[in-house]
Image: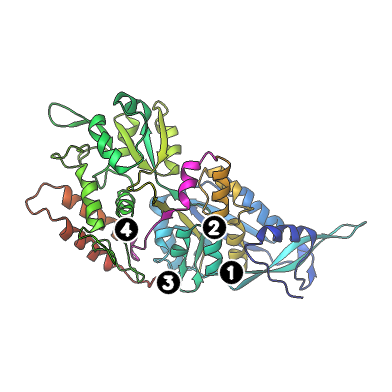
Amino acid sequence: MKTIISKIAFSALLLLLSTGFGFRCNQQTVQSLTPVTLQYWRVFDNEDTMTDIIGKYKTLHPNIDIVYRKFRYDEYEQQLLSAFAEDRAPDIFSIPNSWVARYSRQLMPAPAETVLPVLKTTGTIKKEQVVEYQRTSGFRPRDVQTMFVDTVAGDVILGDKVLALPLALDTMALYYNKSLLAQGGVASPPKTWQEVQDIASKLTKIGDTGAIIQSAIALGGSDNVPRAFDILSVLMMQNGALMAANDGSPLFDKLPPNSQSFVIPGVQALQFYSDFANPTKTTYTWNNNMPNAFELFTQGRLAMMLGYSYTADQLKISAPHIDWDVASLPQVDPNFRVEYANYWVEGVSSKTAHPNEAWGFVQFATNADIVGSYLTATSKPTALRDLAKRANDLAHPLSIFTDAVLTAQTWYHGEDPASAEQAFATLVDAVTTPRDDLDYLKFTKQAAGQISSTLVRQRP
């Protein structure tokens, strides 16, 4: 009898494996299995964050070893490209969600099913370990749409193929210096961008020479504002901009379909952002001559900045003397929340000699019953819909971020995301540089044109 196990019932699969139920092709001893070694490349996370998951996978599949290798971010892509060019690519590798289109030819889509040997103990009086082969159905687009929060499907599905899956999903939040807010007479962190505008002057201090001594919030800059691309993107989306068409073509420089306004929301969001770096505005609190926002925050000279969950770990190390806290990302309309997603996904190399074992691990590692040890070890929010709901119900320590994953969005910005980010940086610099020909729409269209030139992949 042939039994196909779905992903949604994966927790049941683990129980079935332990009780010996499944599709039985034949039985072998562990010693008779061909050993398989998978190379697994990742960034940021130490090997111990995956030790539990790798150990559990090997317990089920004793012939499979996984060699984990951690890289620095600044060397990672070059190492990947060299490895693929020289036919020594890893079997499994991790990339940012924005790189999936760029690496679509290096990623092996999820197979229709995997067939893997599973360890089983038989016998009542004399125990014996034997191996049975287990079939598990592969991930399909509708499985991603069902199991993961909404934004994941748009990033990892190409046509009718699933190219990768996430272990976690990060969202943006507001970090604030509690002491500076109190000194400025601000009782609580702002919930809307209107409130941010209202308190900017209260938290900004400008010296006699015109230099900014204390900044209210890191907005309006390009290179000195971490993830300025993400910030401007989410401001545009919150303001009602449609960032891209189904084929990936940029639309943030245009009116959305059926708009009742003559104001382009993407352009309006750009002006809002740049006003914080405009000396003629009451919101003036930033300029491109200032230090990096994170550095300024650790110095106690920045009241608020935007960051991800990993920012908290960085602050614990770099700013133990700062009394800081984190709040939800401010919104244009609190009743229509839009958050921004930034995360990595796990994919299988198109050149792997072991597709069953590699994709079997990716499916195993990202399952709700398994991924918890990784989320705990890294303090990252979940990408799984059910776990996000469960964490919120239990007042999870990461609730600020897990609350946001269900409404988090991102957008396809071409096969060269670095070029798209540079286009936005150039855009910000253009509208924050004093000039007589300040035309927000013209510069926004130039940025859209630059991003259009990187569109290679057709979106599903």
Report the magenta residues as a range. Answer: 396-417
Please tell me whether residue 406 belongs to the stretch shown in magenta. yes
Which residue carries the number 2 mark? Answer: 40
Helix, strand or loop under label 4: helix
Q: Earlier in the sequence, mark 1 or mark 4?
A: 1
Q: Residue 260's spot in the image, x, y percent?
A: 25, 62
Q: Identify which amino acid the numbered label 3 is placed on.
A: Pro
Crowdedness near tag 4: few (<14), some (14–19) or many (≥20) residues, C-alpha within 10 Å? few
Q: Quadrant of the C terminus?
A: bottom left
Q: CA distance from mark 4 to mark 2?
A: 24 Å
* Colour basis: rainbow
Q: Residue 384's spot in the image, x, y percent?
A: 54, 55
Rendered view: 195 above or below 248: above
Taking 257 as reference, is 36 left or right? right
- Find residue 355 and name its label: 1
- Find residue 460 and name its label: 3
Q: Residue 441's spot in the image, x, y percent?
A: 17, 59
Q: Earlier in the sequence, mark 4 or mark 2?
A: 2
User: Most extreme residue toward the front, as rendered?
Assistant: 260
- Residue at the (73%, 69%) spot, across then down: 133
Q: Does residue 86 show up?
A: no
Q: Identify which amino acid the numbered label 4 is placed on.
A: Ala
Taking 431 as reference, is 123 left or right? right
Q: Earlier in the sequence, mark 1 or mark 3?
A: 1
Q: Earlier in the sequence, mark 2 or mark 1?
A: 2
- State which mark lies toward you, 1 or 4: 4
- Residue at the (33%, 42%) spot, across then down: 192
User: Most extreme residue toward the right, as rendered?
Assistant: 125
Q: CA distance from mark 3 to mark 4?
A: 22 Å
